[in-house]
DNA sequence: AATGCAGGCAACCGCCGCCAT
DNA sequence: TATGGCGGCGGTTGCCTGCAT
């Protein structure tokens, strides 16, 4: 019968994703979800096929992704599960919260396979065996190791040390002005900063405190900013806290600057 | 300092299974 | 029941980076 191609080949971009494309995809999914991957890129304004978007989201941008090196416990779990399940990477990934099948597959091929091969030459190490419930419960601390690749992709160095919300508030008071978003002619009020360098750094504390000052989530007053100034979040801060890709993902000032100054575009998107 | 090489990893490709029609 | 669309999965590729020479 002949299978239809997964996507239109004409004019669709391939290869590494840019920070701008990531922003568009993340923002769109936070606003509208991903009910239909095929239709998503067109609606979001991305020149990518749906499959590529899905892969980028599930393997890299999803909020619950755990970045960083695998712990020895995780590696042992993978080896154990691989013995039982074979190359069923998605099944193995399901037992390792925050890890993707692609990541596990890569780790297997680059590290574990070699290690096992080496170990077979010498007496095999005693491995603890985990039953399903133990595996399910396994929760490894987020490894905050810097992802050097992300830096090369333009996300910049990890933000550290990071100031408290109050630091940011005062920074916002002094460096921001109340204005109308400028990227397109929209009327959503938002914080404007003149350059990425002026944009205050923020950490998880920042979002927590924003949330506590505004439970509604979609937009919030920024304490310390000029009276009446409203910060239009690109997406719900609730989605950002804790498990955000950006808490472990190496975002720099420019990234956040772009996110915030794009809020105008998102306002328009919401009217699609 | 320049070049070559190997390893790591993000992304692509093609197949499969499920589901709606 | 047959067909086609879609999402998911596993295998593979090729680019990028770091290290050795």
Image (tube, coloured by chain):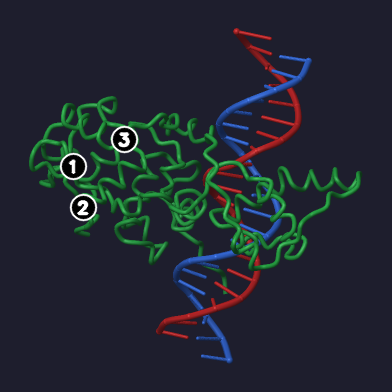
Chain colours: A green, B red, C blue
Q: Is residue A144 left or right of residue A170?
A: right
Observer-side mark, 1 or 3, equals: 3
Q: Chain of mark 2?
A: A
How far, Cα to Cα, is label 1 from label 3? Answer: 14 Å
- Eyeballing the image, is A127 above or below A153? below
Q: Chain of mark 3?
A: A
Residue A161 % position (x, y): 40, 29
Residue A16 % position (x, y): 49, 41
Label 2 sits on a secondary structure element that is loop
Q: Which mark is residue A7?
A: none
- Eyeballing the image, is A115 above or below A55? above
Residue A243 % position (x, y): 43, 51
Q: Residue at x 64, y 52 (%)?
A: A104
Residue C14 % position (x, y): 61, 39
Quadrant in the picture for residue A18 = top left
Return the disc, 1 or 2, that comes first in the chain's sequence.
2
Residue that mark 3 sits on: A164
Quadrant in the picture for residue A114 = top right
Quadrant in the picture for residue A82 = bottom right
- Eyeballing the image, is A169 above or below A26? above
Residue that mark 1 sits on: A222
Label 3 sits on a secondary structure element that is loop
Residue extending furthest toward the left: A227
Residue that mark 2 sits on: A214
Label 1 sits on a secondary structure element that is loop
Q: Residue at x 77, y 61 (%)?
A: A83
Return the disc, 1 or 3, that comes first in the chain's sequence.
3
């Amino acid at each position: 019968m002949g299978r239809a191609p997964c996507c239109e080949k004409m004019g669709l971009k391939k290869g590494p994703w840019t920070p701008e494309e990531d922003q568009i995809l993340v923002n769109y999914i936070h606003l509208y979800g991903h009910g239909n991957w095929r239709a998503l890129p067109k609606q979001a304004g991305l020149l990518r096929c749906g499959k590529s978007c899905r892969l980028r989201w599930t393997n890299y941008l999803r909020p619950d992704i755990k970045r960083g090196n695998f712990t020895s416990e995780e590696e042992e779990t993978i080896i154990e599960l691989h013995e039982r399940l074979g190359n069923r990477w998605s099944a193995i990934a399901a037992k390792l919260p925050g890890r993707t099948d692609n990541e596990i597959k890569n780790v297997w091929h680059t590290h574990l396979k070699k290690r096992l091969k080496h170990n077979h030459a010498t007496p095999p190490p005693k491995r603890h065996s985990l039953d399903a419930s133990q595996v399910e419960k396994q929760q490894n601390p987020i490894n905050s190791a810097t992802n050097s690749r992300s830096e090369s992709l333009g996300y910049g160095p990890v933000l550290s040390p990071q100031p408290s919300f109050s630091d940011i508030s005062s920074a916002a008071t002094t460096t921001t002005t109340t204005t109308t978003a400028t990227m397109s002619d929209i009327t959503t009020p938002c914080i404007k900063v003149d350059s990425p360098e002026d944009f205050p750094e923020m950490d998880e504390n920042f979002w927590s405190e924003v949330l506590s000052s505004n439970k509604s989530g979609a937009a919030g007053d920024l304490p310390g900013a000029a009276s009446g100034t409203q910060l239009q979040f690109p997406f719900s801060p609730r989605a950002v806290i804790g498990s955000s890709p950006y808490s472990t993902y190496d975002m720099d000032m420019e990234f956040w600057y772009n996110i915030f100054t794009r809020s105008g575009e998102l306002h328009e998107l919401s009217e699609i």
